[in-house]
Image (spheres, rainbow, N blue to C red):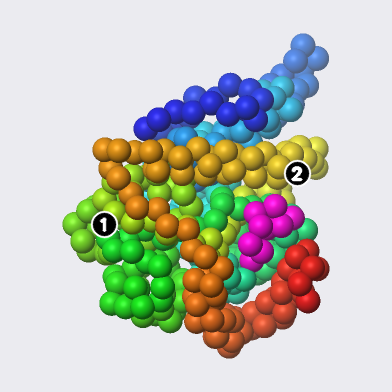
């Protein structure tokens, strides 16, 4: 995999551990004693991601870890794990909940059957069409950072931040330009009933599948199409086994920086303050990471002569045809997305209107 250098990196990369000790996890701490017999605790924490080295989540986690190590004068160390290092996306969520790992980057789409309200991120054409506005919304939204976050915490997952990995796009064995193109297409989705329902509305046949199985499934024809941000499409080489990519911008891929709440609540206040400070610092950094990667890798896909991909950007009129079919899913979410789904969606829609200026 191609390794990239980014201008936002403040320190050198950490050397990551490749093994999880005894699957016990927890807050591993040791005390360094000084000459007076007193000292400060040092920590080693595990941080799992759903992506590989060089992709957005892993680069975010690496920079997050570097900054905390530097702020703490080396008292805090991290073991970083790429996707698959500790199992599937679903395994990683369970490890976070149990405390086997302390930190994780989680996509709400993989928790849609656990926190029903988290399926709100599967609603297509809901979030702003400008990534800067998406960034502002995710940073400031009370509906997400307070109301939705509280529901995750009830399930032993504490969101520290919601952030965007960029717009999601479609790739397929055939062009996906208008809703009729989806008729009968075997479309890979995350484990979110609303995500599946969204593609059924276009006429597709959804198939839930882990990202770890997706390349071979596309190559063998088990599924015909998928959605992901551009950087993930390129770095996972999906464009090598798909002939067409549609710049649809139908959604933004949202990730959560999360921590095990029991672990976090037992930390000293000064350590919590360092973590919170770093979370705030990472908001603009995370946005720049995804912006650089998505722009760079779109160019690579377009210029890959060995694996030519026909790239088509939807017009406003073409997007509107999909939007019309996607709108009824908001009512489906209100009725099936959990007890607080309606209230969260109402508040989020108002917050979006205030940011975009569209009442």
Q: Please name the residue that numbered disc 2 is placed on.
A: 280
Residue 124 placed where, x, y %? 54, 71
Q: Relative to the observer, which residue lies in front, 228 or 41? A: 228
Residue with the mark numbered 1: 218
Residue 255 position (above or below residue 348): above
Numbered range of the magenta stretch: 127-136
Q: Is residue 342 left or right of residue 178?
A: right
Mark 1 packing: few (<14 Cα in 10 Å), some, or many (20+)?
many
Q: Give residue 209's quadrant in the image.
A: bottom left
Q: Nearer the viewer, residue 190 or 272?
A: 190
In the figure, is residue 195 to the left or right of 7?
left
Majority secondary structure in the magenta region: helix
Q: Quadrant of the N terminus?
A: top left
Relative depth, front residue between 241 and 244: 244
At label 2, counting other C-alpha atoms closer than 10 Å, the crowd grade (few under 14, some 14-19, many 20 or more) is few
Residue situated furthest left in the rendering: 220
Please name which of the two marks, 2 or 1, marks the residue nearer to the observer: 1
Residue at (53% x, 61% y) in the render: 249
Distance of mark 2 from mark 1, alpha carbons?
38 Å
């Amino acid at each position: 995999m191609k390794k990239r250098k980014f201008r936002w990196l403040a320190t050198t990369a950490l050397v990551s551990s490749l093994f999880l000790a005894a699957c016990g996890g927890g807050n591993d701490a040791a005390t360094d004693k000084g000459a007076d017999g007193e000292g400060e605790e040092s920590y080693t924490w595990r941080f799992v991601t759903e992506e590989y080295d060089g992709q957005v989540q892993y680069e975010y986690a690496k920079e997050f870890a570097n900054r905390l190590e530097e702020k703490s004068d080396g008292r805090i160390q991290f073991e970083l794990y790429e996707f698959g290092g500790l199992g599937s996306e679903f395994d990683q969520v369970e490890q976070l909940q149990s405390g086997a790992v302390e930190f994780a980057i989680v996509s709400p789409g993989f928790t849609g059957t656990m926190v029903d309200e988290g399926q709100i991120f599967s609603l297509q054409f809901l979030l702003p069409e400008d990534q800067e506005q998406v960034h502002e919304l995710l940073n400031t939204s009370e509906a997400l950072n307070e109301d939705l976050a509280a529901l995750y915490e009830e399930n032993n997952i504490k969101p520290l931040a919601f952030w965007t990995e960029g717009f999601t796009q479609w790739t397929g064995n055939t062009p996906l330009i208008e809703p009729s193109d989806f008729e009968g297409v075997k479309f890979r989705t995350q484990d979110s009933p609303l995500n599946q329902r969204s593609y059924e509305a276009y006429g597709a046949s959804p198939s839930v599948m882990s990202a770890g199985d997706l390349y071979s499934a596309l190559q063998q024809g088990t599924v015909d199409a998928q959605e992901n941000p551009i950087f993930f499409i390129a770095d996972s080489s999906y464009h090598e086994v798909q002939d067409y990519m549609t710049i649809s911008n139908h959604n933004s891929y949202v990730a959560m920086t999360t921590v095990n709440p029991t672990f976090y609540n037992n930390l000293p206040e000064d350590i919590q303050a360092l973590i919170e400070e770093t979370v705030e610092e990472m908001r603009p950094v995370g946005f720049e990471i995804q912006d650089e990667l998505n722009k760079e890798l779109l160019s690579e896909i377009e210029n890959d002569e060995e694996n030519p991909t026909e790239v088509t950007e939807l017009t406003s009129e073409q997007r509107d045809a999909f939007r019309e079919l996607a709108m009824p899913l908001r009512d489906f979410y209100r009725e099936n997305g959990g007890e607080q789904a309606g209230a969260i969606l109402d508040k989020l829609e108002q917050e979006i209107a205030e940011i975009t200026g569209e009442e």
